[in-house]
Amino acid sequence: MNNKTKNIVVSSVFIAFLAFFAVMCVYSYFNPVETSTAERRPLAQFPDEITWGGIIDKTVIDEFEDYSVDQFPFREFFRSIKAKFQLNVLGLKENNGLATEDGYIVKIEQDFVDTNVNYSIGRLQNFYNKFLKDNGGDHYISLIPDKNYFLGIDYGYPSPDYAGLVDKVTEALPEMEYIDIFGSLELDDFYYTDTHWSQDKIGGVVDTLAGAMGFADRLSGNYTENKLDGFKGVYYGQSALRPDPDTLVYLTNDIINSCTVFDYEQNKTIGVYDLEKFGGSDGYDLFLSGTKPLLRIDNPNAEGDEVLVVFRDSYGSSITPLIAEAYKTVYVVDIRYIGEPTLTMYDKMNMIDFDGADVLFLYSALILNSNSFK
């Protein structure tokens, strides 16, 4: 093949390549993807309105740049190539804010955002003062560290000021007894591809809470492990590395199996574990059916009449069934999805009873560092 023929072939392939991508870009324009299943987030769309003013102040340009990145043809394929090249070829430990060590995928945070933390603590204060302060029960609060806390200890990565966060929380809620569970956890207690802890590995956390709250003698401590393969956590898709999925474990025993869960939102009884949720967008929703504003767990085998109110996020979904063994009734409140007016209405209608109940605020640092509460 002479040089002229080679040049023609190369030029033809290059033009065909450009034409193919041009066609795919046009196709993407008319068929935009609304949501990234892998990243669990909405994708940027083509700017709604293009004006000279928007071009001059660069708002339209910024929107178009976000759109072009999010809607690029074969985006997931190229994300995967980039991530694996950086990890395996360049030897980089971090990609798009996610670090990988010994198979654990962890979101790196330099520090907490003061405005988010202050807002979250303010919402906790407000709910505490309005519903719980004078209810006659014992009040506790505990914070759950993210995996980046252990990455900083074990591998020297930068991590937020957890001690400062604890100080802020305890200063804002001095009436509540702080329970330190940091020492009851390690990196191995969390999933490789997800932010959450694994229910079968938090026995130490349960014991720490039980010792501080006085219900240790009401726990059986005996469970059956049930395993579900193929759990793809939130970082499975966000990392673009396509690692091996985790095995999700949930614990059962006769007491947990006998408990009933009432869902106030749907006005019906649901199960402690919803196995159908495992096949959904977030397999961790198996625990207490995921994001539920208000639940009531009734334990017919409880020896006493103790009542507990747990204000929690998704971490609490997996630990609360273990704690519920020790109580007659456990109210599970998620103030990311229920506001004061609704909770006030339930209280006035005697659908929820705070009087004399013990109270536990159990939140992850990730949630306090977000703007999630109503």
Image: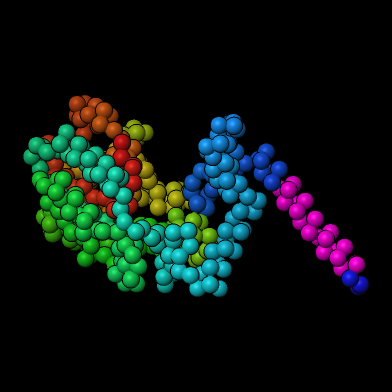
Q: Is residue 85 magenta?
A: no
- Residue 253 point in image, percent of width and height: 29, 57
Q: Is residue 246 left or right of residue 51?
A: left
Secondary structure of the magenta portion, mostly? helix
When the figure is inspected, residue 196 is found, relative to residue 151, above or below; the finding is above
Image point 72% across, 51% down: which residue?
21
Residue 259 in view in this figure: no
Give whichever of 45, 199 is nearer the camera. Answer: 45
Give whichever of 110, 75 is nearer the camera. Answer: 110
Image point 14% across, 49% down: which residue?
171
Image point 44% across, 50% down: which residue?
282
Give whichever of 191, 34 is nearer the camera. Answer: 34
Residue 166 image-quadrant placement: bottom left
Q: Is residue 189 left or right of residue 193?
A: left
Image quarter hosting the C terminus: top left
The colouring scheme, among rainbow, by chain, secondary structure or one colour, is rainbow
- Residue 337 point in image, percent of width and height: 33, 37
Residue 1 image-quadrant placement: bottom right
- Residue 33 point in image, percent of width and height: 59, 43
Q: Is residue 240 left or right of residue 100?
A: right
Q: Is residue 4 left or right of residue 284?
A: right
Q: Is residue 18 magenta?
A: yes
Residue 160 image-quadrant placement: bottom left
Total number of numbered discs in the rendering? 0
Residue 91 in view in this figure: yes
User: Which range is magenta?
Assistant: 4-24
Residue that lies at the very extreme toward the front in this rendered image? 56
Image point 23% across, 62% down: which residue?
182
- Residue 353 point in image, percent of width and height: 17, 35
